[in-house]
Image: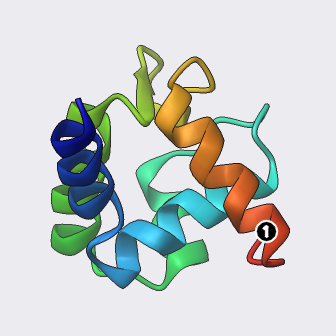
Amino acid sequence: MKNSIVEEVEKGIGNPIKLRILRVLAMNPSQALTKYELEKKTYAKPVSLRRHLKDLIALGWVEELPYTPRRYQLNMRNETLKNLLEFFKAIHYI
């Protein structure tokens, strides 16, 4: 199990854009944002944002909500993500 957590964390935070996505979503966890809002708040280019958002959704850290336009928010049921957010809070990243 330890190796799967290591792989999950490395895949989840292996890029500054992923960190920015997580940070922006964590700042208001009850608010779901569109891709456009995430682009503006993370300063990510659309192609890059889509790629990293897809990875975070595949990990189960971010949920894609079925609205038009699609909206995204953190999956607070994911234990690894909850622990990572606690770390972010402890170091004042969020």
Question: Is residue 14 placed above or below 66 in the rendered structure?
Answer: below
Name the residue at 25% across, 46% down: 8
Name the image quarter holding residue 45.
Answer: bottom left
Name the image quarter holding residue 17.
Answer: bottom left
- The answer to whether residue 55 shows anywhere in this view is yes
Mark 1: which secondary structure?
loop
Which quarter of the figure is the N terminus placed in?
top left
Question: Is residue 91 placed above or below 69 in the rendered structure?
Answer: below
Relative image position of residue 12 (x, y in whole percent):
31, 56
Give the labeled residue for mark 1. Answer: 94
Residue type, mark 1 in image: Ile
Relative image position of residue 46 (x, y in whole percent):
26, 70
Name the residue at 47% across, 71% down: 19
Left or right side of 15 for 22: right
Question: Is residue 19 placed above or below 45 in the rendered structure?
Answer: above
Which quarter of the figure is the C terminus placed in?
bottom right
Name the residue at 63% across, 37% down: 82
Front one among 66 and 61: 61
Tally the numbered discs: 1
